[in-house]
Image (tube, rainbow, N blue to C red):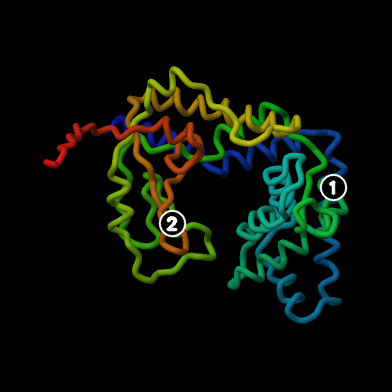
């Protein structure tokens, strides 16, 4: 089990979000055609900050906080990576990018101030031609959308699909002892409640999480060897076909990794704000598609006998 723990630490480093962000930024910064666009994005941010005297008091305070705690190149990186990570060429609701940027802005005691500031920066950043904003009245969903105007290298897109989600754990998760304890081995102050704005320190059923975390699983080799994963929705565009293939390829890599490392794994579970429990992960998850559900079996097998009652 010690070897499994070491492999788990390696996996957590490999699938860390910071590595994805660095890979995206490397792609963007090395693209010569994109250099003028990034320069314009930087200029738009500086221009927004320079106008702070014209803003109303609360906005002026937010602008001052932004300048005191955040460097312009960092802000530019957050916006550029957020746009490419969220959209990748297809229209998506803007809130994902806003939250991505807001969570990285420092100095704001009120998260909503960070959200407001991120929203305004993203709005002015659209003038850079890095991405488009689509008004709610013009979008298919009736909500404000963004669409990046640039595409990442295909190898980078596959890397993102491969490392977007942590795979199941190769050893039993750490014990959950409070509302900011993670089951993963690398020390992370992670809320046991999904989505940062839902976090609280009130009593929570931590014992239920620990029980769920203690259950070991394995891949069902009959399903794995005899059935192919198929889409659950109509793939009516080239983009949808590509995205499904990227995730299918990445899922196969996770299946192979789990088999090569003993085919024994555990899920790390968390609550939503209503107390429902969710197993973390995408490629292997018992709350996913029918195929992914069928792919998972309990590691500890027991015979179940059924006795018929007398008529």
Q: Is residue 177 visible?
A: yes
* Crowding near the residue tagged with mark 1, few <14, some 14–19, many ≥20 C-alpha atoms within 10 Å: few
* Crowding near the residue tagged with mark 2, few <14, some 14–19, many ≥20 C-alpha atoms within 10 Å: few
Q: Which residue is mark 1?
A: 39
Q: Please identify the residue farthest to the front as the structure is shown.
A: 311
Q: Which mark is residue 300?
A: none
- Position above or below: 175 against 180: above
Residue depicted at 47% across the width and 63% down the height: 273
Residue depicted at 83% across the width and 58% down the height: 135
Q: Please identify the residue farthest to the bottom as the structure is shown.
A: 57
How many numbered marks have been drawn onto this rendered protein structure?
2
Residue 22 sits in quarter: top right
User: The residue tagged with tag 2: helix, strand or loop?
Assistant: loop
**Image position, residue 3 (x, y; %):** 30, 30
- Position above or below: 30 against 189: above
User: The residue tagged with tag 1: helix, strand or loop?
Assistant: helix
Q: Please identify the residue farthest to the top as the structure is shown.
A: 225
Q: Nearer the viewer, residue 85 or 250?
A: 250
Q: Nearer the viewer, residue 9 or 142?
A: 142
- The first of marks 1 and 2 along the sequence is 1
Q: Say whether residue 193 is left or right of residue 87.
A: left
**Residues at marks 1 and 2, CA–CA distance in whole angstroms:** 35 Å
Q: Is residue 191 visible?
A: no
**Image position, residue 63 (x, y; %):** 74, 70
Q: Which mark is residue 189?
A: 2
């Amino acid at each position: 089990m010690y070897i499994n723990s070491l492999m788990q630490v390696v996996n957590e480093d490999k699938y860390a979000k910071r590595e994805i962000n660095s890979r995206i930024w490397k792609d963007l910064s090395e693209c010569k055609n994109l250099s003028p666009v990034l320069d314009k994005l930087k200029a738009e941010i500086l221009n927004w900050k320079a106008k702070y005297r014209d803003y109303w008091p609360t906005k002026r305070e937010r602008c001052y906080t932004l300048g005191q705690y955040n460097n312009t190149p960092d802000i530019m990186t957050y916006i550029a990576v957020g746009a490419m990570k969220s959209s990748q060429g297809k229209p998506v609701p803007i809130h994902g990018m806003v939250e991505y940027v807001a969570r990285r802005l420092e100095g704001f005691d009120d998260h909503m101030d960070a959200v407001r500031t991120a929203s305004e920066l993203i709005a002015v950043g659209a003038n850079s031609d890095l991405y488009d904003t689509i008004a709610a009245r013009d979008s298919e969903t009736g909500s404000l959308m963004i669409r990046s105007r640039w595409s990442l290298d295909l190898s980078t897109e596959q890397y993102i699909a491969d490392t977007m989600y942590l795979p199941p754990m190769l050893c039993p998760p750490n014990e959950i002892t409070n509302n900011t304890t993670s089951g993963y081995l690398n020390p992370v102050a992670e809320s046991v409640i999904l989505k940062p704005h839902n976090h609280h320190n009130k009593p929570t059923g931590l014992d239920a999480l620990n029980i769920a975390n203690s259950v070991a699983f394995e891949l069902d080799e009959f399903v794995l060897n005899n059935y192919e994963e198929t889409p659950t929705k109509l793939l009516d565009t080239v983009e949808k076909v590509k995205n499904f293939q990227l995730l299918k390829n990445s899922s196969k890599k996770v299946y192979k990794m789990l088999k090569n490392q003993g085919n024994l794994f555990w899920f790390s579970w968390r609550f939503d704000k209503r107390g429902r429990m969710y197993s973390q992960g995408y490629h292997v998850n018992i709350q996913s598609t029918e195929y992914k559900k069928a792919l998972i079996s309990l590691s500890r097998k027991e015979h179940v006998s059924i006795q018929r009652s007398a008529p």
